[in-house]
Amino acid sequence: MRISVACTVAFVASLASANPLINRNQGGWEFPESMPLVTRQDVPAPGTPAYLCHENCGTSITLSREEGYCTNYQWIARYDACLQCANPQNVWQYYGNSVTAAAAACGLTAVPV
């Protein structure tokens, strides 16, 4: 019986520690469908400028699926960051159409710098 209790405790502890890095209430990001699979498989290292740019552009698209996103400070911040990094990181070709459509719905013009 002690082995069963010990195994159960270990199992529950492993589940508790296996939570994701992202808060469940926070929107995640994903690569756009327009990005070729081979490019998606070559994910930049977390924390690098390329990774952060993918995260900003992708999250701006994800957040744009929520009602009232045009006034959501998280969407605005991600959208602005995406416009700042998209050309230097050469990712506008993948995110441009979706980011532009989301911006247009808010009365904005998406032009990366």
Image (tube, helix red, strand yellow):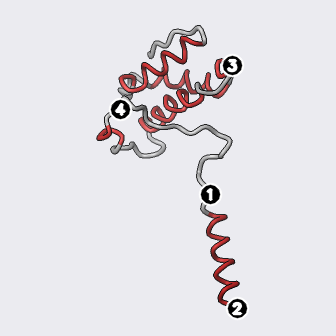
Q: Amino acid at mark 3?
A: Thr
Q: Earlier in the sequence, mark 2 or mark 1?
A: 2
> For the residue carrying disc 4, how many other residues have a C-alpha within 10 Å: few (<14), some (14-19), or many (20+)?
few
Q: Amino acid at mark 1?
A: Asn
Q: Are marks 1 and 4 in contact (CB under 8 Å)?
A: no
Residue closer to the observer: 49 or 74: 74
- Label 1 to label 4, Cα distance in Å? 28 Å
Can you say whether 56 is above or below 112 in the image?
below
Q: Amino acid at mark 4?
A: Met
Q: Which mark is residue 47?
A: none
Q: Which mark is residue 71?
A: 3
Q: Which residue is mark 1?
A: 19
Can you say whether 23 is above or below 78 in the image?
below
Q: Quadrant of residue 89?
A: top left
- Label 2 to label 1, Cα distance in Å? 29 Å
Q: Which mark is residue 1?
A: 2
Q: Are marks 2 and 3 in contact (CB under 8 Å)?
A: no
